[in-house]
Amino acid sequence: MSLQISTRVWKWQVIVLFISCNNIGSGENLQYSVWEEADLGTLVGNITEDLGLPKAIMSERKIRLRSSGGGQYFAVDQQTGAFFVNRTIDRENVCGSSLHCLMTVEVVLEKPLELHRVEVEILDINDNSPMFSNPEQVIKITEIFAHPGARVPLEEALDPDSGINGVRQYSLSPQLYFSLSIRSPNDGAPSPELVIEKALDREEKADYHLILKAFDGGEPPRSGTSKIVILIIDFNDNAPIFQHSFYNINVPENVPVNTSIIQINASDLDEGFNAEIEYFLDGRTPVFVRQLFSIDPETGIIRTNGILDFESSDSYEITVRAKDKGIPQMEGSCVVQIAVVDVNDHVPEIVLTSLLGEIPEDTVVGTTIGLFSVLDMDSENNGEVQLVLSPDGPFQIKSFKDHHALIVNNLLDRENVSLHELVLTAKDMGSPSLSSQVTITVNILDVNDNPPLFLNQDLIHLLMKTMNLEIYFIHYLPLIAMRGTMPNLLSL
Ligand SMILES: *[C@@H]1O[C@H](CO)[C@@H](O)[C@H](O)[C@H]1NC(C)=O
Ligand SMILES: *[C@@H]1O[C@H](CO)[C@@H](O)[C@H](O)[C@H]1NC(C)=O
Ligand SMILES: *[C@@H]1O[C@H](CO)[C@@H](O)[C@H](O)[C@H]1NC(C)=O
Ligand SMILES: *[C@@H]1O[C@H](CO)[C@@H](O)[C@H](O)[C@H]1NC(C)=O
Ligand SMILES: *[C@@H]1O[C@H](CO)[C@@H](O)[C@H](O)[C@H]1NC(C)=O
């Protein structure tokens, strides 16, 4: 508590003359000061002493305060002249946030009537804490703008106290990504600014929660806090990424049209439109591949669009792209390698090249009487063909690669069997296996009893050819096989 007295008499006289209409004498102007919130009864000054009134006449003068203005807060003791606090003074209530708070009290003395003016300065005590009007400040920053050095102004705290007891300082909960910068104008409250220290990536962390604390300059300082919520707004800075860059799948050639063969999946770290993905086949995909495969833009399911045929193409490579719907649009791609798996869908086919329907019963063992080949369009086991002759009787099949010869491998006896009906079965090794049959009829001609009816010129030629062929098979074939070439048998 401090007391201050000044005597600015001439000024007061002017005011007194101006405000008083009745015959009030001139008075002295006193000035005191008192702390706000001072206890009731706190002595502010000694009016009788300061006005220089002799103690003896105090009771006569009937000293009193006018109740208007500041008068309601103070009272004066008739006996001692003590001017004291008689009502709690809240400086902020009386003067708001103005820097100086001055209350005027009018002191009235009787006999003679005198009016004095007492100015009481209410001194601020730090009775208010800084306060933010929003307990939570939400700040949205687009991630591309959230680069180091960027600044975001923060809301200032308010403190009704004045001067040093007002807001003087701010602090931010410590963390890596943000720091606090405070602008302090010479005459005014400091204002806080958030400074981004490190680039912010929404995909790494989308929100930050900080505490901003404001301090006043009182002793001890008082403080107030506000939550700062920083939301990082997505920017389309991520392209869709496929789970795998390369997909390898096997598809049986006989799958029905519109069969789903694979679902590929890309993901995008962004959010919203920036992460909404659409799949499509690369623009350079050949037309014939587009005719065979299609992709669902939303699900990434690849379906067959036509009939696959291993025999016409056993593999396809498709580049699939995915784009998001952000601005700017971003794209990713992957490659799908489709291996068409052969299915045993071709029946082996026996093609007879030549056949002697009739042979003499003395035909030499080893003579070739027929030539044929076997075709199976399938591959591997599905195309590997076994030949079975039944009943085999005096005949046998000799094979070289895909070429086969029907050979007499035992003595013929027309008197026992004059007509041989042979069933030749070609069967592939697929699962399930497919087979086909041809029936071969060989007539045995009697050479002892009858003239050789069949020996017309054509047949002789043919027979000679088959004899040659037999020689060829038995003597030259191994040699040729070793050289790895296969001459056209029919040209022999
Ligand atoms: C002090 O204030 C109280 C109530 O506000 C009032 O009754 C009393 O008369 C005052 N005292 C003086 C000396 O004016
Ligand atoms: C005020 O001053 C007068 C004269 O000096 C003195 O008699 C009186 O006791 C004082 N009052 C107080 C409250 O100190
Ligand atoms: C292909 O199959 C899907 C799923 O079963 C179906 O929604 C679609 O209509 C089919 N498309 C055609 C062309 O049949
Ligand atoms: C695609 O991948 C994402 C992320 O790996 C996953 O959440 C989602 O379920 C997947 N979708 C499909 C259809 O596999
Ligand atoms: C007659 O033919 C049958 C069947 O071909 C055979 O089992 C049998 O041994 C033959 N007989 C003679 C005498 O060759």
Image (cartoon, rainbow, N blue to C red):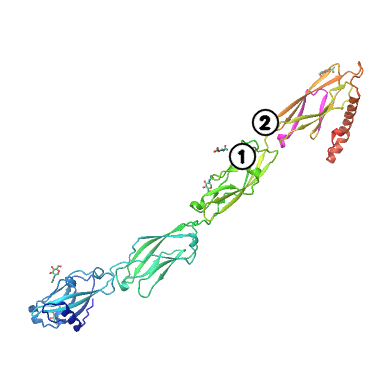
> Label 1 CB, ligand 3: below 8 Å?
no
Mark pair 2, 1: CA separation:
27 Å
Q: Secondary structure at mark 1?
A: loop
> Label 2 CB, ligand 3: below 8 Å?
no
Q: Amino acid at mark 1?
A: Asn
Label 2: few (<14), some (14–19) or many (≥20) C-alpha neighbours in 10 Å: few
Q: How many numbered markers are drawn?
A: 2
Residue 165, labelled with which disc? none
Q: Quadrant of residue 289?
A: top right
Q: Per the image, is 262 magenta?
A: no
Q: Quadrant of residue 140?
A: bottom left
What segment carries the magenta color?
379-399
Is the C-beta separation of discs 2 and 1 under 8 Å?
Answer: no
The residue that label 1 is drawn on is 305
Q: Is residue 292 above or below residue 173?
A: above
Ligand number 2: quarter of image: bottom left
Q: Quadrant of residue 316?
A: top right
Q: Secondary structure at mark 2?
A: loop
The residue that label 2 is drawn on is 432
**Near-viewer residue (220 or 124):** 124
Q: Is residue 458 above or below residue 63?
A: above
Is residue 13 shown to the viewer in this render?
A: yes
What percent of the width, then of the height, locates residue 446?
A: 89, 18
Q: Quadrant of the N terminus?
A: bottom left
Q: Is residue 447 above or below residue 140?
A: above
Residue at 70%, 34% (x, y): give it. Answer: 382
What percent of the width, then of the height, locates residue 398?
A: 82, 30
What percent of the width, then of the height, locates residue 71?
A: 17, 72
